[in-house]
Image (tube, grey):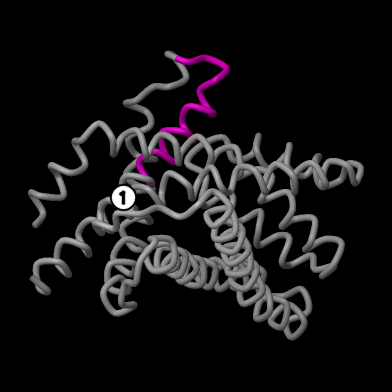
Amino acid sequence: MVLSTVRYLSRTDVHTFAFSVAANAILSFFPFVVLMMTVIRRVFHSRVMYEVVLQLLRDYLPAGQDFVIRNLNSMVNSRQRVQIASLLILLVTSSGIFLPLEVALNRIWRFEKNRSYLGNQLISLALAFACGALALTSIALTAGPVSFMEFLLRGYGTAFIRMIGFLMMKVFGMAASIAIFFLIYWVLPNGKIPARVVLPTAVIMGLLSEALKYAYILALPWLNFQEVYGPFALSVTMMFWAFLSGLLLLAGAHLSAEEHLRNTL
C-alpha cells in the first residue's frame, strides 16, 4: 500500500494538481490572514488574539517571518478598501485551491463525476469559511487562558505565560490542522465517504505536516533559494512548502482510499 502511494506521488498529474493547489494557496494565504487579523482587531478588539496570530505566523512560515508580519501589519492598518480587496481575492482563489483538489480526490476515490463549477464554488466557499472558523477558534482558545493568566499575575511570570501560550498554540493549532485535513478528505470528494475511514488519516497527516515543516526548515540552508532566486527567494520558499503540503494531503487521501477500497472489494 505504501509502495502504491509512492508510485501515485510520482505521477505527473499528481504533481500538476499539487502545483496548482500550491499556487492558489499562496495567492489566498495573505488575503486570508489579512481578513482574520482585521476581524480580530476591529470586531473582537483582542490584543492577545492578535499576538497569537503573529506567533502562529512566526511558527508556521518556514522563512521570512519578520518581513511577512511587518507587511501584514501595514495592510491591516491601511484603509478599508484593502480588506475589501482581500475578501474579493479570497473568494476567487479559494475555488482555485479546492477545484483541482476535488478532481484529484475524485480520481483517488474513483468517483467518475466531478461537481459542476457552481457546485464546486459553493463547496469551496463553505470549506474556506470552515477553515477560517477553525483558525479563529484555535486562536481564541489559546488567547483566553493567556489573558486570564495575565490578569491573575498582573505583570509577573511573563516567561511562564509565554511558554504556556506557546504550548497551547501548538496543541490547538495542530487540532485545527487535523480538522482541516478531515474536512477536505470527507467533504470535498463528490461522493459518500465514511468519516471513520478518513479520520485516522487526517490525524496522521496533521501530525506529519508539523514534522515535515521542521524538516523543510532544516533543509532550507542546503536548498539555498536565496542564491538561486535572489529577491524572489521568499516566494519560492513558500511555494515549494505549499507544494510539499499538497503532496502530503494527496498521499494521505490515497492511503485511506486504497485501504478502504481493498477492504470493501
Q: Which residue is mark 1?
A: 248
Which residue corresponds to the image point at 34% horizontal and 77% vertical from the top-left? 195
Is residue 13 toward the left or the right of residue 78 in the image? left
Q: Position of residue 32 (x, y in %)?
A: 66, 50
Residue found at the very far right of the displayed protein: 79
Highlighted magenta segment, given as a residue range: 229-245
Residue 118: % across, % down: 58, 53
Kind of element beneath mark 1: helix
154 lies above or below 80: below
Q: Is residue 37 left or right of residue 261?
A: right
Specify the principal SS of the magenta part. helix
Direction from residue 100 to residue 118 in the image, left or right? right
Q: Quadrant of residue 228?
A: top left
Q: Is residue 239 magenta?
A: yes
The quarter of the picture where the C terminus appears is: bottom left
> Residue furthest toward the bottom?
152
Identified at 88% across, 42% down, the residue is: 81
The vertical placement of 66 against 194, above or below, is above
Which of 12 and 165 lies nearest the eye of the viewer? 12
Q: State yes or no: residue 22 in magenta.
A: no
Amino acid of disc 1: Leu
Above/below status of 63 relative to 102? above
Residue nearest the viewer, comparing 223 with 5: 5
Q: Position of residue 41 (x, y in %)?
A: 82, 61
The answer to which quarter of the image holds residue 194 is bottom left
